[in-house]
Amino acid sequence: MADDTAKIIECPCGAIIEGSSDDDVVTKAQDHAKATHDMELSRDQALSMARPA
Ligand SMILES: [Zn+2]
C-alpha cells in the first residue's frame, strides 16, 4: 500500500534524502545510490532505511 507520508533516508555516507512519499524517497535514494555509490538499491532496501520526516 502506498504511503504518502514524507520520509527521510539518512545514507551511511552522510547524505540526507528527503521525499514527499514512499515512492518519491525510494526514487531519490535509488538515484543517489547509483550516482554516488554505483549501487543498485532495491525498493525494500530503501524503505528499510527510511523514517518519517
Ligand atoms: Zn550515500
Image (tube, helix red, strand yellow):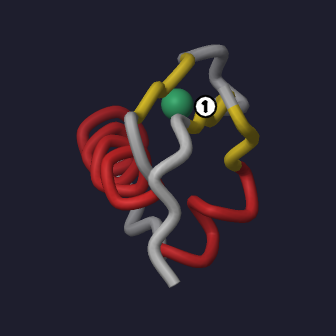
Which three-letter amino acid code belongs to the residue tagged 1?
Answer: Ile
Circle 1: is it few (<14), some (14-19), or many (20+) Cα within 10 Å? many
Rendered residue at 60%/77% (across/down): 44
Residue 6's x, y, as percent?
Answer: 52, 35
When the figure is inspected, residue 1 is found, relative to residue 39, above or below; the finding is below
Residue 31's x, y, as percent?
Answer: 26, 46
- On the image, which quarter does residue 37 sit in? top left
When the figure is inspected, residue 44 is found, relative to residue 19, above or below; the finding is below
Q: State the residue position of label 1.
A: 8
Residue at disc 1, secondary structure? strand
1 relative to 12 in the view: left or right: left
When the figure is inspected, residue 7 is found, relative to residue 49, above or below; the finding is above
Taking the view exactly as shown, the residue that stands out farthest to the bottom is 1
When the figure is inspected, residue 43 is found, relative to residue 13, above or below; the finding is below
Residue 33's x, y, as percent?
Answer: 40, 46
Q: Nearer the viewer, residue 19 or 34?
A: 19
5 relative to 49 in the view: left or right: left
Rendered residue at 57%/60% (across/down): 46
- On the image, which quarter does residue 23 sit in? bottom left
